[in-house]
Amino acid sequence: MSDYRDIIKAPIVTEKSASLNENNTVVLSVDPKANKTQIKQAVEKVFNVKVESVNTINMPTKKKRVGRYAGRTNKVKKAIVKLAEGSSIELN
């Protein structure tokens, strides 16, 4: 990865991720090629926080059709990032 901002795509804001946010945990959409170490370094540099742990989930693609054309959705990798005590990220 050339830049830390290329690793982190967007925050994932759902009811479940909002409930995790109360426990200093943030859910992010990241580049599918990034590993846990790269994700940890990127979050620490971009948001200026201390990361305790990183868990990742590779979401499977889904088949989609539009008329007679069939295809698949894009690959998505989710990162569940647990922040150290006293650190927080505002996702407003």
Image (cartoon, helix red, strand yellow):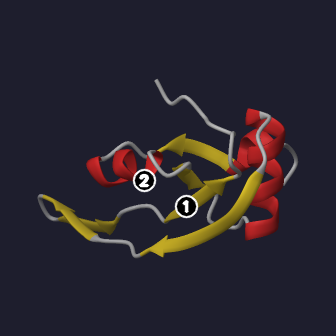
Specify the amino acid type for callout 1: Ile
- Closest to the observer, 75 or 57: 57
Left or right of 38 in this view: 59: left
**Which residue corresponds to mark 1?**
80
- How far across and down, in percent of the image, does residue 41 sit? 83, 53
Residue 20: percent from the left, percent from the top? 42, 53
Q: In this view, does 16 lie above or below 68?
A: above
The part of the image, by quadrant, that contains residue 70 is bottom left
- Disc on the earlier residue, 1 or 2: 2
Rendering coords of residue 88 (x, y %): 62, 37
Kind of residue indicated by mark 2: Leu
Q: Position of residue 26 (x, y in %)?
A: 53, 49
In the picture shown, does residue 45 fall above or below 92? below
Q: Nearer the viewer, mark 1 or mark 2?
A: 2
Q: Mark 2 points at which residue?
A: 20
Question: Residue at image x 31%, y 67%?
Answer: 71
Residue at the extreme front: 85
Residue at (71, 50) in percent of width and height: 7
